[in-house]
Image (cartoon, rainbow, N blue to C red):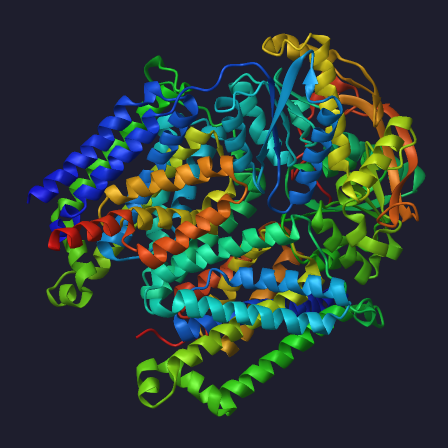
Amino acid sequence: MSDGKYLWITLGILIAAAMILPPFLPPFWVMLLTQTLIYTIAAMALDLLIGYTDMASLGQAGFLAVGAYSAAILFTRYGFGFTGAMIGAVLLAIVSSAVLGLLALRAAGVYFLMITLAIAMVIWGLIYRWVSMTGGDNGIAGILRPNPLGIDMFDPIHFFYFIFAFFIVSLVLMLLFIRSPFGKTLVGIKDSESRMIVLGYNVWLHKYLVFIIAGAFSGLAGGLYAFYNGFVSPSLSDLAHCMAIVLMVTIGGPGTLVGPIIGALIIILLENIVSIYTERWVMVLSAVYVITALYAPQGILGWIGRLMKSERAA
Amino acid sequence: MRRDRLGNSWRPALVFAITLITIFSAQSSAAADGPIKIGFIAPSTGNFAQMGKDMVAGFQQYLEEINSEACGRKIELIVEDEGGNPGIAVNKARKLITHDKVNILAGVFMTSAAYAVGPVASQYQTPLVITLSAGDDLTQRKRNQWVVRTSFTGSEFGFAAAEYAFKELGWKKAACIGMDYAWGHECIGAFQRKFEALGGKVLQKTWAPVNTTDFGPYVANIDRNADGVFDVITGAASIRFLKAMETAGLKERMKIITPMTGTDSSLLPALGDTGLGVYSVANWSAVLDNPQNKEWVAKVRKSMGKEAPMGAALCYDGARWIVEAMKSIDCKVEDKEALLKAIREVKLTNTLRGELAMDPYGHPVQDIHIRMVEKSPESPSGYKNTVVKTYPKATQFFDYDPETYLKTPPSTRDYPACCD
Amino acid sequence: MEFWITQTFNGLSYAALLFLLGGGMTLIFGIMKIVNIAHGSFYLVGGYIGLTIVLKTGNFYLALVVAAVVVALLGLVMERIFLRNLAGKDLRQMLITTGIALFLQDLCLLVWGGDPRNLSVPKYLTGSFELGEFYFPKFRVFMIGSAVVLFLILWVFQEKTRVGAMVRASVDNSEMAGGLGIKVPLVTMGVFSLGALLAGFGGVIGCAFMGIYPGLDFELLPFAFVVVIVGGMGNLTGALLGAFIVAMIDNFGKALFPEVAYFTLFAPMAVVLAVKPTGLMGKSQK
């Protein structure tokens, strides 16, 4: 009982730190934090699938890319503003995850892994070759940040808080979702699908809906990314990117929603900071993959949690 | 049961939260100024890694020759990996500007990376001196005061190639094939405009994805009625393409012209005899006959152990350009407006390419050469790019009037339209 | 007419390469039910090792053998140390293979540098056979030939030998197979190495055919995936069929509709996924 409350407190500390620190940090770090928040939304979305429903979807980066490109194209080519572009991004992510989810859910287990990864590849291929629409390998540049209420979003700190608002809203929505009856059913499905079927739940529909919801949030993250980066490219949907988001969830701790926040922070820091110090940062990253998979499949939170539990038991 | 899982997590989460907060709070703002900082973006991983390394080597070599200092201030070079894609370049550019606080951004290899980094430079108001990449509109329709170039672009190469193909090689019909990105689009677009303006006809324009591995189907599709092929296939892929042309028996029947990125000295060893007789359009060659170039090429043969590659040559010149510009304003690089003006107005006389100066649009006025691959006993690779024709002091517009040209649409995948 | 014959021939040679790449991956999937993200890296390492051998000894066949063997050993070590204890834990296996893939990629960059490289083949394999107005590059013929030979060897092994029967039994039902006295862990290790061997062999051939450079491993993975998905995960004949279909559609697609190059690659995969997710020759899921 009291344990759960402390988790909220921890989350509160993280959020408070995120709100207080930025004005004191150099702009580069503020931008990294902003990027982390954006990826956290996508990682939390994936956690809904991996951690709560036991659907290891490897293709979420694909829906992030769909969102990013939708926002980019709507903004640069069709003159939509920020709001219109973001709505478009989420809508298109929903549509694509709805359509592709029908394909993906025909499989289960490791086949599901394979197929969701293949879906991300298809999206990548589409982006890469539909050059007239997406610019292909050139990507799309010139995505300018919005100017809500006349506040200059080009300032890293202003933009950070702007993105932070989106993050908080997403976090709250996902928390509500998990605590809802629908969310509890998902956990039941993760525990034992057959039991839930016997109990009369429409398991397929639940999985399908959570797949779409995860796709929607990934699309949201993608749209935000487009405005953060000012530039989108096909690599958003490539293999390395897909696995990176999976790693964020796994290394933080699946099934906790707090885990992905930590995971996103770690991976983004690793990619941006370690590369300053060594050219072999890819090897560092590969070590993280292997160590996490071998020794900490429940992530850092899980690993330390086990340590603490054994301490308490002793 | 779910609560247990969450519940156990509070302690570790707390530990982490505190750790992370501590790390972040310990960050201090960036260091004060003093040395002149140049941020250099070039690929060190990916398909173009070797060209990127050549770029860095050339740029660094010039700085070493002047002891990395100018006007009594130290010059600090910070190199970042462009990776294989423009997204990485954008990230690094931003990092160099906001974290390392560089005074100038330089380098860039991929055309698409240049188009992506350009807006970043103008957003953050930092001069970007592109020392290798192309990208027509960066110095044409989308030019802005913060971006200049010291290398080459697709339009001048395409125009020169068409001129040579029609007038000297006697082509009446040409087939074009290029990599499906801005570089390919712009070179071929320019080629088509000039070739057809001269009275020739382009029979087909084929686009292959940038990382095409098997050119077999594309080669099989080349119109056998063409007199020659203008191909814009870069780097390692150029080797694959030319070999495919050879095994299909086409290389003997049709002459091939490619931009210098297809037969650069770094590619000649792997090309071997397949490269013989292939023409290229270039703004430099290892066998250019001026004293600076001869001396430099000899030096590079010793230090790099191979024939000087274009990446090194162009970035060596680029470094010189930047430094000469800085010296002309007494290295007061913090005055960005003055720095930009200096870069645009400085006149160079002893570069590897001869005399260089910038046109009003931010692109060099330079000699454009047509080269052909021949055997060479002196070259470490056994081959060389002999200069067979020079168009002196050409501009990016060649013989078009700039203002008229700028009113036409940019060369893209579908413009000019082809072919019927 | 020249167009159709040349393109079909090109498609066949491309299918050969895809089979080598996808065949190994499907074997590994069949026995261990894991998606080996490091499969492209096997190809890459094989290619680079082959390159070095040819540079040092000039012997192409030696390169083929050594590279295949070294990569097989690499696979063996990888299976033994990293994957053995993770049977059934799909996500963790994919994370590990991803990590290993990244490691191998960076290692290759460190050892062989960033230059694109090409492997020179013996003189008698360069040039083309000329039949009238048709050119058939000799090396492409060699590719088709080796793929067919390898497939036949593997097929005979799988269908006609005792060891092959053990493999089939282990794939079908490892518990029963173990109960019957088959040393399933040994079989698993063997098949994994075999899959790696195919990829390594393919790497040398591919290096000679189209060169090698850092990043090629991840670029080729989608192609391997498509072959495995279309042909059926775990089925060798399916891999051959899948490779053939994919190569043909891709080849003709590229020649007839160059703008949709990647789409012609992934379209068959999407169709198969929609109709029969386990692939054309795959077993239905339990």
Outermost residue on the left side: it is A1
Q: Position of residue B292 (x, y in %)?
A: 87, 27
Residue at position x 40%, y 61% from top? A114
Q: Nearer the viewer, residue C211 or A196?
A: C211
Q: Nearer the viewer, residue A215 or B403?
A: A215
Task: Identify whether A248 is placed above or below C137.
Answer: above
Left of B286 or right of it: where is C38?
left
Q: Nearer the viewer, residue C43 or B144?
A: C43
Q: Nearer the viewer, residue C79 or B214?
A: C79
Q: Position of residue B309 (x, y in %)?
A: 77, 39
Left of C60 or right of it: where is A150?
left
Q: Could you tell me which quadrant the N terminus of chain B lies in?
A: bottom left
Q: Is residue A76 visible?
A: yes
Q: Position of residue B15 (x, y in %)?
A: 23, 38
Image quadrant where residue B363 sits: top right
Outermost residue on the front side: it is A314
Q: Position of residue A290 (x, y in %)?
A: 40, 56
Q: Is residue B308 visible?
A: no
Badge count: 0
Image quadrant where residue A265 sits: top left
Task: Identify whether C195 is placed above or below C112.
Answer: below
Left of A132 or right of it: where is B26?
left
Task: Identify whether A142 is placed above or below B332.
Answer: below
